Amino acid sequence: MRFLILCLNQSLFFFSSPPPVDLDPCDPGLSLSAGRSVMAEPDYMDEDCDELIKPKKLINPVKSSRNHQDLHRELLMNQKRGLAPQNKPELQKVLEKRKRDQVLKQQKEEQEAHKKRSDLEIELMKRQQKLEQLELEQQKIEEEQENTPEFVKMKSNLRRTKQETDGEERTT
């Protein structure tokens, strides 16, 4: 024998055989057939009963009005174009203004911090600029030497060696 346990309205029922299936489909009570679950289904879901009035969705008179439809269409078009209305609440406007002012204030403070430098920083900056200029001059000289023809380089080397030998003979 097979036992079924059903919970209906918080009470337990035990069946030794399947429950009766010969119930009226229009009956609002719960019936358990092979395709149905334990949960109660609404009566209007049954298409067999023509006697019952099926609920319909109510029409919103505001949404169905021509003025509302035109306004909604205009708002959608403006949103697509990026022309959304700027009717922000006063609190939001004040908070945005404060945030902008705070960002501007921070930027001004950073600029002032760069402008205000101690004497030591100024002296270090000058020295760094001088070193950079010297490096640039050395690079230019090296580039010029690399670009000069080889016979000019050899001639300058000969002159240096000649001057060195003349300087040694004079000292002795």
Image (cartoon, grey):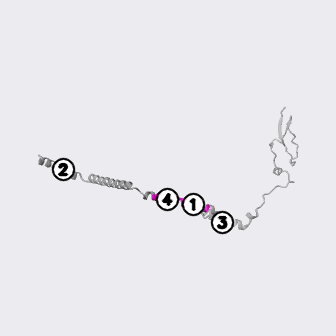
User: Where residue 154 sits in the image (x, y, percent)?
Assistant: 20, 50
- For the residue pair 158 and 88, the one nearer the viewer reads as 88
| Callouts 4 and 1 close, C-beta under 8 Å | no
Element type at mark 4:
helix
Tell me which numbered mark, 3 or 2, is placed earlier along the sequence.
3
- For the residue pair 115 and 33, the one nearer the viewer reads as 115
In front: label 1 or label 2: 1
Report the residue marked by disc 4: 107
How many C-alpha atoms fall within 10 Å of the one at disc 4: few (<14), some, or many (≥20)? few
Which residue type does callout 3 highlight? Glu
Tell me which numbered mark, 3 or 1, is placed earlier along the sequence.
3
31 versus 115 height, above or below: above
User: Where residue 81 sits in the image (x, y, percent)?
Assistant: 60, 63
Which residue type does callout 4 highlight? Gln
Report the residue marked by disc 2: 160
For image coordinates 45% across by 57% down, the residue present is 113
Give the residues in magenta: 92-112
Report the residue marked by disc 3: 74
- For the residue pair 119 and 155, the one nearer the viewer reads as 119
Per the rendering, the mark at residue 98 is: 1
